[in-house]
Image (tube, rainbow, N blue to C red):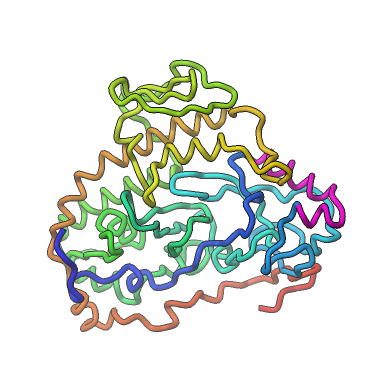
């Protein structure tokens, strides 16, 4: 790949200027691969009293049982201090726990060291969140409809306001590209292009070639569909679809992959065919399938809330695993098509500066004012924001 010069390709941080650090939990137990475990953990915490409740909670400098915090935007959890709280568990929500690993979270501000309320305020059915991954093999950007917990990269919402309004793009960027391409790209077009063309250093080469742009957007939209996994479920061609060939055990311990037979073994359980490119798929320097399975078979720490987990492998996990294998295989098939984008001569950043697109105004790097209603503050008071 050619080296990047200052005028070669602009950084993603300039093109999508507003970013948020991912939420920081401070404790592991509010997340799990299944919602039932979270409700059981909450019930155990609520039944404990005094020092026992405090030990189970795992206090930090940011959160203790006596912390006074407001409600999490968009959620219905309580705001009473946890030292004297009671009642049922807030309904768990889906989150992106690790690359391609959707898990569940108790969406309660009192449990999270740094919840990033500004991120929750703009997360809705229209929002797409772009997540930077750690350097290493695999994609540098992921796209999701779920609040992501991946660290240490930044999260860049496609829209600054709920309802898919006010794109989080450098002001004038789409209009400048329209002058080059002969049509006005949509924010989703730009995001698709970014997923297809982004470089390992998180710069994004832009093009004025309408044909190349169209091919890149098509490639990126397929990546976006596979990453978000909304709408129709992805499928491999007949004969290449993974199936359970031997039932999975109640608690698989030994996980291995037979490359010659394209078979994933979980103890005596077998799934095949599993394409090598799916097994080898890495993100943030970690083999995705291996990490996904390990998260669901690991034991929690004895005496802690993480020890509350399913006694056996869940059928829903088998269905999710089959779909994950399919997604990774289809994403891997797209990689050769990205080669065309790696050698393009980009619209230089200097051109964007001359057009006034860059540098972006400082206000574009800050969250928009999106509140159109009161949010609940600590102990049920209205938050002053």
Judging depth in this view, the residue of 209 and 183 nearest the camera is 209
Q: Which quadrant would the C terminus be assigned to in this image?
A: bottom right
Left or right of 338? Residue 159 is: right
Q: Position of residue 171 (x, y in %)?
A: 35, 76
Left or right of 8? Residue 333 is: right
Q: Position of residue 269 (x, y in %)?
A: 48, 20
Q: Position of residue 361 (x, y in %)?
A: 38, 83
Q: Residue at x 20, y 71 (%)?
A: 179
Q: Residue at x 70, y 39 (%)?
A: 308
| Count of numbered circles in the view | 0
In terms of image quadrants, where is residue 155? bottom left
Q: Main secondary structure of the magenta part?
A: helix
Q: Position of residue 220 (x, y in %)?
A: 29, 51
Farthest residue, direction front: 302
Judging depth in this view, the residue of 287 and 40 nearest the camera is 287
Q: Residue at x 69, y 48 (%)?
A: 91
Q: Using the image, determine if residue 313 lies above or below residue 232.
A: above
Judging depth in this view, the residue of 296 and 10 nearest the camera is 296
Residue 216 drawn in magenta:
no
Left or right of 371? Residue 234 is: left
Q: Which quadrant would the N terminus be assigned to in this image?
A: bottom left
Farthest residue, direction top: 246
Q: Using the image, determine if residue 218 lies above or below residue 15.
A: above
Q: Residue at x 39, y 57 (%)?
A: 134
Residue 43 drawn in magenta:
yes
Q: In this picture, which residue range is highlighted in magenta?
A: 35-55
């Amino acid at each position: 790949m050619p080296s990047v010069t200052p005028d070669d390709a602009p950084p993603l941080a300039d093109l999508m200027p507003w970013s948020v650090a991912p939420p920081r939990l401070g404790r592991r137990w509010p997340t799990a691969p299944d919602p039932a475990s979270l409700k059981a953990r909450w019930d155990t915490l609520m039944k404990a009293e005094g020092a026992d409740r405090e030990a189970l909670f795992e206090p930090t400098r940011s959160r203790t049982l006596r912390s006074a915090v407001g409600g999490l935007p968009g959620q219905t959890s309580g705001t009473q201090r946890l030292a004297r709280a009671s009642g049922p568990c807030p309904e768990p929500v889906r989150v992106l726990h690790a690359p391609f690993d959707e898990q569940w979270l108790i969406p309660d501000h009192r449990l999270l060291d740094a919840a990033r309320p500004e991120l929750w305020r703009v997360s809705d059915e229209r929002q797409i969140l772009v997540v930077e991954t750690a350097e290493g093999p695999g994609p540098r950007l992921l796209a999701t409809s779920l609040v992501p917990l991946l660290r240490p990269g930044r999260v860049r919402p496609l829209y600054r306001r709920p309802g898919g309004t006010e794109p989080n793009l450098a002001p004038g960027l789409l209009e400048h590209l329209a002058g080059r391409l002969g049509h006005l790209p949509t924010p989703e077009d730009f995001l698709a292009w970014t997923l297809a063309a982004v470089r390992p250093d998180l710069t994004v080469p832009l093009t004025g070639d309408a044909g190349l742009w169209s091919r890149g957007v098509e490639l990126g939209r397929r990546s976006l569909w596979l990453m978000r996994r909304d709408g129709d479920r992805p499928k491999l061609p007949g004969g290449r679809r993974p199936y359970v060939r031997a039932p999975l055990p109640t608690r698989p311990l030994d996980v291995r992959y037979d490359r010659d037979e394209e078979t994933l073994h979980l103890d005596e359980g077998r799934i095949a065919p599993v394409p090598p490119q799916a097994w080898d798929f890495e993100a943030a320097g970690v083999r995705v399938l291996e990490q996904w399975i390990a998260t669901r078979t690991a034991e929690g720490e004895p005496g802690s809330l993480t020890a509350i987990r399913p006694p056996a492998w869940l059928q829903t996990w088998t269905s999710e695993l089959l779909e994950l294998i399919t997604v990774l295989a289809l994403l891997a098939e797209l990689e050769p098509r990205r080669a065309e984008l790696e050698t393009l001569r980009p619209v230089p950043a200097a051109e964007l500066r001359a057009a006034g697109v860059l540098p972006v105004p400082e206000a574009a790097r800050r969250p928009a004012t999106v509140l159109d209603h009161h949010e609940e503050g600590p102990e049920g008071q209205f938050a002053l924001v």
